[in-house]
Image: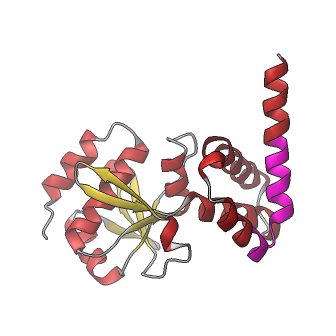
Amino acid sequence: MTVSRTEVENAVASARSKPERTLYLGALLEKATGEEAIVVGGSAVEIYTSGRTSTNDIDVVMPRAKALKVVKSWGFLPNGRVWRRKDWDVDIDLLGPNFTGSRLKIQVISTPYGPVRVAGVEDLLAKRLAELKHCPTTPLWRKDLAKQVEILISEHGNQMDDEYLAFIARRDDVVDILADFRQRRRLSKTERLRV
């Protein structure tokens, strides 16, 4: 289905927040290509945290060929590996069709422009824990990753699939760091209750 540049511009203009804009663009990409589009990475975390964390681009897992034609027709220009609309301050990173998380954990969110798929919070959490534990990072990026983990656990910890999270934590060798963050969360909660 064709989605005009005007429709996309109206959607972007009507978004009340950056996460909402991401949802709209994801839904419109899926509608325009007829292909499943899954918002992943920092942009998915930004959605789950209602904008309390931020990212520079919109990470989308989907087949690239049709998506490239669509983003070009919407006025995006290549900027390194991402496609940019400078006037919107939006970069889209089309990651290809290989989704590495659980398809069963994908959340489908309704928007005025159709549904959009967002990677499951468990997969996003495990990826951030693995990056903290196993990857060399700058102090600033470590601080941002830790903030993302803390917010995801705080806001979504009670709704997570603990069995699946335990499986991917073992697989990614992050059981210890997950336990540390959960313990800090419990201690923080206990301290707030005492006050």
- Residue placed at 33% from the left, 73% from the top? 36
Magenta stretch: dominant secondary structure: helix
Please determine whether, in this image, residue 68 is positioned above or below residue 166.
Answer: below
- Quadrant showing the C terminus: top right
Q: Position of residue 103 (x, y in %)?
A: 48, 73
Q: Position of residue 144 (x, y in %)?
A: 69, 49
* Residue 26 sits in quarter: bottom left
Q: Nearer the viewer, residue 179 or 8?
A: 179
Residue at the far front in the pictured view: 163
Image spot of residue 146 (x, y percent): 74, 50
Residue at left offset 16%, top offset 59%: 5
Residue under the point 30% across and 75% down:
67
Q: Vertical placement of 143 versus 114: above or below?
A: above
> In the rendered image of this protein, does residue 13 appear above or below residue 133?
above
Query: Where's the N terminus, which quadrant?
Result: bottom left
Name which quarter of the figure residue 183 lies in: top right
Q: How is the image coloured?
A: secondary structure
Work out whether residue 146 or residue 157 is closer to the camera in this orientation and state it.
157
Instruction: Judge left or right: residue 124 versus residue 116.
Output: right
* Image side of residue 162 versus residue 159, left or right: right
Query: What number of labels is visible?
Result: 0
Q: Which residue occupies 65% across, 67% down? A: 164
Q: Magenta stretch containing residue 172, yes or no?
A: yes
Residue 93: x and y in percent read: 44, 68
Region in magenta = 169-184
As for residue 170 lying within the magenta part, the answer is: yes
